[in-house]
């Protein structure tokens, strides 16, 4: 069958090597003669998968020995609860920046557990920019930000310098470019964008933050329990971690520098066309445009349905904007080849000719 | 390669039809031209998977219209927290029966949230029987039991009659036999035994119990939120639910009556051999012997390693007892064919001849 160009916002396109490895492992995992989904998570063959996935994260991000890495369940959404439960003690305040739906949900959950200071928000302009002009009080329990806003298409390209523990939700742009991971006290990411399939969440925590954690947290929501048990306090999301391991192998083989070159080239190609083509307009402040999620609309809204239909005919899939914002969104995660972006740009140009 | 007999306690053997369907869907899901793990969970093709999985659960268990069915993350272990968070209000007491490690963990978590009355326990005899002689006070918020104790190999074949909301962890024997599901107010089960791969948890709740739920629960731990959003409040464990759906199709095609006949035949075959063969002895009170997990030891403990080695040579896999109890454990979940049990019985008889 003809190739589908997959611009889905997540779950999203993955490297073919990870899919091929999964197909093989479902039939015969690591020479066991059993399917990956039928073996004990405590078999030596599967424990090796988790160990390698953890090591790959450490290697790719050049994490120092000060960090712990675990794979949990419940997505970034459960982290919105676990972070304040573990790290927001009574009498202290947590600082958040509200840059979109997910950042807003993180704020809402934290407020259930303690005092929250929303230091900045871009809600005034429908989250179309990243607020930059704010101070981080020195006495916060932690500061929380979201590096890429999947729904609105904005991205943080530099992080605030602060002595306060720095926590970041990197669900939709982790491993897309080099960055200094050692400046963070905690990084977390739902797997289903750049790292793997839905069903597991990467959590990276600095030991010094962990030492400050509240000990009286329900066991499944206690980071220390999961770390002490090597992601195996309870049965982990076996298949999802396996696919992550193979995706991480691919990311490591590429290297984050090459990944950034590749991702920048894809984003530049598409933003250049959006800016050139009179039928389309970007929705995000130029300096905050995400390389992962490119949001744009048609200048004539009446043509939107017709353009989406045209894209579908051209095997360009997953371009409808999130139901809460509308318009179009092209997600250009790591595994998306530039040929897919070129196919979209070609379609935009053909659609321009047909409609001018 | 030669066939492996998979006696793993979970993750465990699954029907071949579910594995075959997964292999196909990883390459081309539902005619989309995309991999199952690359499509949006909100695509109509995937929403149909969740809807069918939910309907299959309702059909197989003959659930009345009073029940809600969702697929969550975090295993049964997260349910140990969510149940008291949602259903144990201040000033009320929850009743538990402690029949093993998992039941004990459920008790420990509930105590973090409120008053708990452990109505009965079999800890005095290393959980080798099911306590039956206890009363359930009428004023409990709910009564919680565990239908099958995976680690110790005991199983409840009848459930207490009570007016108190009845909650049961059926992780390791759900769908293994017919039972009156409509007598329960809540049933939950980690998928990785009879229902599918690790990574998702089935939760069935009666609407009348849901109406009594605490509204001030963190969003991801709030049953009502997940139910109102049809298991899609956040990105679900896409692959795991897909495999569950196919496993549930297989269960429905067999029917629970036939499944019980099959499971009883397997268990009878193995227990009969354990009772006959002087080299082996069962560890569980005869009337409480589980059909899912058969625990036994060698009368001469020195032969244990040698028997396990012999089994491995015969492609009998996953027979080592849980690290907390030792000995041997053969898990005979739905998908295990009787031929595998016969192969184990043959090995026991051959081992007897070689060692007498």
Image (cartoon, coloured by chain):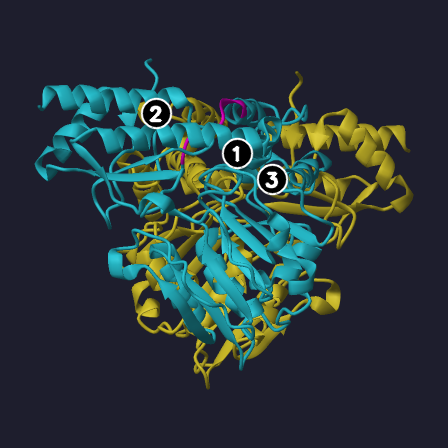
Chain colours: A cyan, B yellow
Residue A128's spot in the image, x, y percent? 29, 51
Of residues B244 and A286, which is closer to you in this image? A286
Which label number is shown at residue A341?
2
The reply to the same-chain question for discs 1 and 3 is yes
Of residues A154 and B219, which is closer to you in this image? A154
- Badge 2 local density, few (<14 within 10 Å), some, or many (20+)? many
Which label number is shown at residue A127?
none
Residue under circle 1? Answer: B14
Quarter the C terminus of chain B occupies: top right
Which of pointers 2 and 1 indicates the residue nearer the eye? Answer: 2
The reply to the same-chain question for discs 2 and 1 is no
Residue A104's spot in the image, x, y percent? 36, 61
Residue B94's spot in the image, x, y percent? 50, 76
Q: Residue at 54% of width from left, 33% of height from top? A: A243
Of residues A96 and B143, which is closer to you in this image? A96
Question: Where A133 falls versus B36 (above or below)?
Answer: below
Residue under circle 3? Answer: B332
User: What kind of secondary structure does the magenta stretch mostly adopt?
Assistant: loop
Q: Please give the range of residues in magenta.
A: A12-17
Q: Residue at 37% of width from left, 58% of height from top? A: A131
* Element on which disc 1 rests: loop
Question: Where A275 falls versus B158 (above or below)?
Answer: above
C-alpha separation, residue under disc 1 versus residue under disc 3: 11 Å
Name the chain letter of the residue that bears numbered label 2. A
B331 sits left or right of B174 in the view:
right
Q: Quadrant of residue B273?
A: top right
Which of pointers 1 and 3 indicates the residue nearer the eye? Answer: 1
């Amino acid at each position: 069958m003809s190739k589908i160009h997959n611009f889905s916002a997540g779950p999203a396109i993955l490297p073919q090597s990870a899919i091929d490895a999964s197909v093989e492992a479902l039939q015969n995992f690591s020479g066991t003669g059993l399917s990956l989904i039928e073996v004990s998570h405590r078999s030596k063959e599967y424990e090796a998968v988790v160990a390698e996935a953890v090591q790959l994260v450490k290697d790719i991000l050049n994490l120092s020995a000060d960090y712990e890495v675990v794979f949990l369940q419940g997505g970034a959404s459960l982290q919105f609860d676990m972070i304040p439960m573990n790290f927001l003690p009574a009498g202290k305040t947590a600082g958040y920046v509200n840059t979109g739906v997910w950042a807003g949900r993180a704020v809402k959950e934290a407020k259930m557990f303690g005092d929250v200071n929303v230091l900045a928000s871009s809600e005034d302009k429908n989250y179309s920019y990243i607020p930059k002009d704010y101070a981080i009080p020195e006495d916060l329990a932690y500061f929380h930000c979201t590096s890429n806003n999947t729904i609105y298409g904005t991205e943080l390209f530099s992080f605030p310098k602060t002595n306060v523990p720095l926590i970041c939700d990197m669900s939709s742009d982790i491993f897309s470019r080099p960055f200094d991971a050692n400046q963070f006290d905690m990084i977390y990411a739902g797997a289903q964008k750049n790292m793997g399939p839905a069903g597991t969440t990467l959590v990276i925590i600095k030991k010094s933050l962990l030492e400050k954690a509240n000990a009286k947290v329900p066991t499944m929501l206690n980071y220390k329990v999961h770390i002490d048990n090597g992601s195996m306090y309870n049965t982990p999301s076996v298949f999802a971690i396996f696919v992550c391991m193979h995706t991480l192998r691919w990311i490591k083989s590429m290297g984050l520098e090459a990944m950034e070159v590749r991702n920048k080239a894809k984003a530049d190609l598409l933003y250049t066309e959006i800016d050139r083509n009179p039928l389309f307009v970007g929705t995000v402040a130029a300096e905050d445009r995400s390389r992962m999620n490119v949001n744009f609309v048609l200048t004539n809204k009446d043509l939107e349905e017709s353009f989406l239909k045209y894209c579908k005919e051209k095997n360009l899939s997953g371009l409808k904007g999130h139901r809460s914002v509308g318009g179009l969104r092209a997600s250009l995660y790591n595994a998306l080849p530039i040929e897919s972006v070129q196919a979209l740009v070609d379609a935009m140009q053909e659609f321009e000719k047909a409609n001018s």
